């Protein structure tokens, strides 16, 4: 099994390298995103999005319908992940998405961080490093409903955004057995299993540099099969977005854990800067 997982890690690296080498079509949109937090965390993502107009009509709900295919390559000091997502907008108020990801992780000695850890228990004290021991795989399907009052009421100061997103996914690590706990890129303990995630957002858009202030609730349930204990987390965030005319967007998101108490209620302050060209 160890040889198989090593081969999986090598294949994941080869796939990631090939994607970097592929030429990008001028018809799509390319963006670079830098992510970080006070934990600390750091990651750079390069994305290419190709949009295909389809299912369009003349009405307000159908005139902008399209299919977007987005490829993202993310690299951090401890891991690299390639993801591909297809998002269909059949109506202005709805989105349907399918996607998948592959990646692998390694140790970064200067910070003492490990991209892949494995253990027989969800107690992090029992985890051991499994650097390049296999491939991280994820398949997901999601649906979103959204509404912006700015599409109904005239005026730049009348835009209230409401959005809900529901997702089912299956995540696995090829280096783990069915009953092993593992952790990829410091994302928390998990097993090879189905997971459910939901996002609920209410925000106010304004025509200023600080163009969005929102309240976001994230719900995630890990372990949806009968032989795996469920673990549900609730994270409340306050996204604040700043947009600049030359293609740069900066987002800050203070977050707290609603399922924790005392000092553990604080999660992090996440930040991301996206440049589109």
Image (tube, helix red, strand yellow):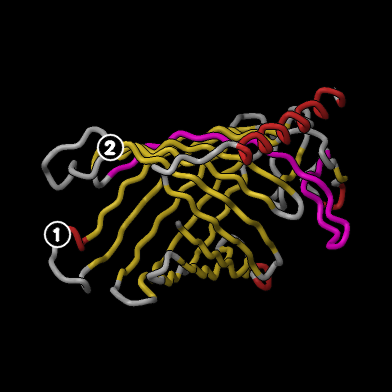
Q: Residue at x 44, y 52 (%)?
A: 199
Report which residue position mark 1 lands on: 152
Which mark, by number, is residue 126?
none
Residue 16 appears in the rendering = yes
Quadrant of residue 208 within the rendered picture: bottom left
Query: For the magenta stretch, what is the residue range?
Result: 94-119
Please check the rendered image and state whether residue 97 is part of the magenta-colored stretch, yes or no: yes
81 versus 98 height, above or below: below
Residue 231: x, y in percent? 62, 46
Dot 1: element: loop
Q: Is residue 133 magenta?
A: no
Q: Quadrant of the C terminus?
A: bottom left
Q: Is residue 80 above or below residue 19?
A: below
Label 2 packing within 10 angstroms: few (<14), some (14-19), many (20+): few
Q: Residues within 10 Å of mark 1 (few under 14, many from 20)?
A: few
Drawn side of residue 124 relative to residue 57, left or right? right
In the picture, the disc for residue 53 is 2
């Amino acid at each position: 099994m160890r040889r198989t997982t090593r081969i999986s890690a090598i294949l994941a690296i080869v796939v990631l390298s090939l994607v970097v080498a592929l030429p990008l079509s001028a018809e799509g949109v390319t963006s670079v995103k830098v992510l970080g937090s006070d934990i600390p965390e750091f990651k750079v993502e390069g994305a290419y999005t190709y949009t295909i107009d389809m299912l369009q009509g003349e009405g307000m709900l159908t005139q902008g319908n399209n299919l977007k295919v987005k490829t993202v390559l993310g690299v951090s000091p401890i891991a690299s992940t390639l993801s591909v997502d297809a998002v269909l907008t059949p109506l202005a108020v709805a989105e349907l998405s399918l996607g998948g990801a592959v990646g692998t992780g390694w140790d970064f000695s200067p910070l003492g961080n490990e991209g892949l850890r494995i253990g027989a228990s969800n107690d992090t004290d029992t985890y051991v490093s499994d650097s390049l021991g296999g491939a991280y795989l994820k398949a997901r399907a999601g649906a979103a409903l959204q509404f912006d009052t700015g599409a109904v009421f005239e005026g730049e100061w009348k835009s209230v955004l409401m959005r809900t997103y529901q997702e089912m996914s299956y995540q696995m690590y090829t280096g783990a057995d069915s009953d092993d706990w593992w952790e990829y890129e410091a994302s928390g303990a998990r097993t090879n299993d189905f997971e459910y995630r939901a996002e609920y957002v209410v925000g106010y858009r304004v025509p200023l540099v600080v163009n969005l202030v929102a309240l976001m609730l994230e719900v995630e349930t890990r372990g949806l099969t009968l032989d795996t204990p469920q673990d549900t987390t609730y994270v409340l965030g306050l996204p604040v977005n700043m947009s600049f005319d030359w293609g740069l967007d900066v987002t800050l998101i203070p977050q707290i854990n609603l399922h924790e108490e005392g000092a553990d209620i604080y999660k992090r302050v996440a930040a991301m800067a996206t440049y589109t060209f």
